[in-house]
């Protein structure tokens, strides 16, 4: 392993304690995924080169229903601790099965980000060209798997175990760990984690972990150039990507960001714009859950209506409202509100749009809300 690569690996391990630094050090966008079933895994957040839309790629089995096998919308948390949601994933199960890579690629799924990363803000991509990878793999001096689990947060060194020979020059790669690993380092949720290496003095993503052999610890991965080809194939057939819907009642708005931990009964924050059920609790170490709404149509925002019902309501609510003109400005406190009954209640705002609103709910107890309307 080269001295340069060793120092870069050390740099990643040091800065990974603050996940935001990783995004700058590795130009990476690994995310932690939580499926509707509660299963956890990893994914790669990237911007589509065709139009800048935000997407996540992950192994399909991570976000599949344990009962039916159907792929389901899921939650994610990025390196800065911002949570978000994805629409129903698109599987790669209909691609040809001519090579080992094609067969392994059956476990790929791509999902459109609907909350958490606006289009155009994802600068990461899905890797080099195939020829670039073939040349880089010959010069690579070492590899590292990036994990966002607390038991293995940071980088863990790997060595090449085997790679297949196919039209991509070895798109299926097996890696094995180097040395003694910390307890719990390689757990089931490692699926979707990126493997990185040094190329021209920079750390770049090489492959994504599909699964781990529990007996040998060997990791089966797919190179990102192959994953990119599969995404381009899906993108070419796409007939309009799903985005967060705006409600037909009241003033249209978009949910830009969320910060909360989902709980049983939660149908996702995006359902607040229709009639659903948002069930949330505070992230560890926090006392509130947050939503950031954007209103782009000019006009007055007179009030905000918080909707609760007997089937989706947590009773008394206490929340705070902040506002700013756009995402470049500083947040300014507006006022605190109380909603004593489990019902639909309107609260005065009196602000002109375009504007962003940040709502912070007291979450010392779980919060359940059926809908949010602006009038």
Image (cartoon, rainbow, N blue to C red):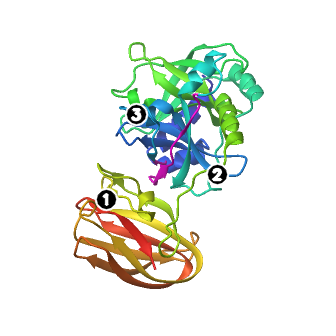
Label 1: which secondary element: loop
For this view, does 214 lie left or right of residue 79? left
Q: Which mark is residue 100?
A: none
Label 3 environment density (alpha carbons within 10 Å; few <14, some 14–19, many ≥20): some
| CA distance for labels 3 and 2 | 30 Å
* Vertical placement of residue 221 versus 342, above or below: above
**Residue found at x 40% / y 77%:** 304
CB contact under 8 Å: marks 3 and 2: no
Q: Nearer the viewer, residue 141 or 269?
A: 269
Q: Nearer the viewer, residue 235 or 360?
A: 235
Is residue 287 visible in this depiction of the protein?
Answer: no
Determine which quarter of the picture holds residue 305. bottom left
For this view, does 70 lie left or right of residue 286? right
Instruction: Tell me residue 309's x, y (percent).
Output: 27, 66
Q: Nearer the viewer, residue 262 or 89?
A: 89
Label 2: which secondary element: loop
Residue named by callout 2: 53
**Residue found at x 68% / y 22%:** 137
Most extreme residue toward the right, as rendered? 131
Label 3: which secondary element: loop
Label 2 environment density (alpha carbons within 10 Å; few <14, some 14–19, many ≥20): many
Label 1 environment density (alpha carbons within 10 Å; few <14, some 14–19, many ≥20): few
Q: Which residues are magenta?
A: 76-93
Residue named by callout 1: 286
* Vertical placement of residue 32 versus 144, above or below: below
Q: Is residue 288 magenta?
A: no
Label located before the other in sequence (2 or 1): 2
Residue named by callout 3: 152
């Amino acid at each position: 392993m080269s001295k340069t690569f060793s120092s870069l690996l050390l740099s990643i391990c040091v800065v990974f304690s603050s996940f935001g630094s990783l995004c700058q050090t590795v130009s990476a966008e690994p995310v932690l995924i939580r499926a509707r079933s509660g299963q956890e895994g990893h994914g790669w957040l990237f911007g589509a080169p065709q139009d800048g839309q935000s997407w996540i790629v992950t192994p399909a089995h991570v976000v599949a229903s344990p009962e039916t096998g159907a792929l389901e919308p899921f939650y994610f948390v990025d390196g800065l601790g911002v949570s978000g949601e994805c629409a129903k994933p698109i599987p790669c199960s209909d691609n040809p099965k001519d090579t080992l890579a094609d067969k392994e690629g059956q476990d790929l799924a791509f999902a459109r980000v609907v909350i958490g990363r606006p289009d155009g803000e994802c600068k990461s991509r899905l890797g080099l060209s195939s020829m670039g990878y073939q040349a880089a793999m010959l010069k690579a001096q070492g590899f590292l798997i990036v994990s966002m689990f607390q038991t293995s947060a940071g980088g863990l060194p790997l060595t090449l175990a085997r790679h297949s020979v196919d039209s991509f020059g070895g798109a299926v790669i097996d890696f094995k760990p180097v040395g003694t690993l910390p307890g719990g380092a390689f757990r089931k949720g490692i699926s979707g984690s990126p493997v990185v290496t040094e190329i021209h003095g920079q750390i770049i993503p090489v492959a994504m972990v599909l699964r781990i052999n529990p007996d040998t610890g060997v990791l089966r991965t797919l190179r990102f150039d192959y994953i990119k080809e599969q995404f381009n194939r899906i993108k070419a057939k796409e007939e309009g990507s799903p985005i967060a819907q705006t409600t037909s009642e009241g003033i249209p708005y978009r949910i830009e960001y969320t910060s909360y931990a989902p709980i049983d009964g939660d149908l996702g924050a995006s359902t607040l714009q229709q009639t659903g059920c948002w069930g949330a609790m505070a992230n560890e170490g926090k006392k509130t859950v947050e939503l950031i709404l954007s209103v782009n149509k000019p006009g007055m925002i007179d009030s905000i209506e918080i909707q609760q019902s007997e089937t989706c309501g947590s009773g008394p609510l206490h929340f705070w409202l902040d506002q700013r003109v756009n995402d470049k400005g500083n947040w300014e406190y507006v006022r605190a509100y109380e909603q004593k009954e489990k019902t639909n209640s309107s609260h005065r705002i009196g602000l002109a749009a375009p504007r962003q609103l940040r709502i912070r709910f007291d979450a010392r107890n779980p919060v359940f809300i059926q809908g949010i309307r602006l009038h």
